[in-house]
Image (cartoon, grey):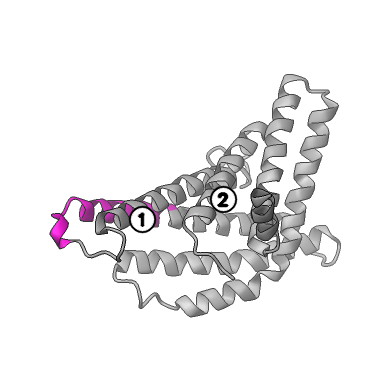
Amino acid sequence: MAALSSLASALESYRGRDRLIRMLGYCCQLVGGVLVAQSPGSDTGTRLLTLSSQLSHCRTVLRLFDDLTMFLYTKQYGLGAQEEDIFVRCVSVLGNAADQLYYPCEHLAWASDAGVLRLDSTRWWTLSTAFWGLSLLLGVARSLWMVVKLRQKLRQPPETLIGRPPRSPRKVLETQVLAELLSLLSNVADLAISVHWLPRGLLWSGRLPPWLLGLLGTISSLLTIYQAVWFEPATP
């Protein structure tokens, strides 16, 4: 019952619901892709891929309402004056800008496909994917930088480390390193997916089979959920 209560509590929040839908969607794509690869005429595999596509579409529609939240976050972060590291500040500001531009591009692409607007949806899908990939690339750079900096601190003598009681300074730094490594792996997996959806001719764009996309997405989703459970502060 405790597990069911935790799941129900998570589903009451937008972020918790989005994480679950994302994981289910990529899991369906993974299993469906494997079944179709083994047997191209697999009815079960085709149904699972269709379900995965519908779950992805569901998340796209829900993101129509994310602009204000992203704007407020970007405004609150500003130019990152609270960051001590200039590299982290610059990368974070650029990442916020890429995220902010991603949403309207995706909205226009969705509206075009839905027949609401008469636009070239392919162009807007490409732009939204490019902004997504740029944000992920900046996230990878930030996490790599943070891991290097945190490990440098770990190599310092224990008496020079300042932590937050009651946890030891070293334990705090090790937890931060783990969090950054998980973010790094998650962003790398998503970056591989984003490149796949770019126009053909760029790296491996359009070349990844459905099962591999599902595998990468499932890994990224599980890492994100793990981070949410163990590293994000609880909200009332």
Q: Nearer the viewer, residue 221 or 211?
A: 221
- Which numbered dot is residue 47? none
Picture residue at 32% right of the left edge, 57% below the top: 172
Residue 147: within the magenta?
yes
Mark 2 or mark 1: name the one nearer the start of the chain. Answer: 1
Give percent across and percent down for residue 103.
64, 66
Picture residue at 70% right of the left edge, 56% below the top: 8
Between the C-alphas of marks 2 and 1, the distance is 17 Å
SS at mark 2 in the image? helix
Give percent across and percent down for residue 149.
26, 56
- Quarter-of-image position of residue 218: top right
Considering only vertical position in the picture, is 9 above or below 213?
below
Query: Would residue 5 be found to the left or right of residue 194 on screen?
Result: right
| Start-end of magenta stretch | 140-160
Give percent across and percent down for residue 64.
72, 67
Is residue 145 in view? no
- Name the residue carrying label 1: 176
Give percent across and percent down for residue 167.
31, 59
Q: Nearer the viewer, residue 109 or 28?
A: 28
Picture residue at 52% right of the left edge, 49% below the top: 226
Q: Which amino acid type is marked by label 1? A: Gln
The chief SS type of the magenta part is: helix
Instruction: Answer few, some or many: residues within 10 Å of disc 2's Cα (few below 14, many 20 plus, some between 14 and 19).
Output: some
Count of number-bearing discs: 2
- Name the residue carrying label 2: 225
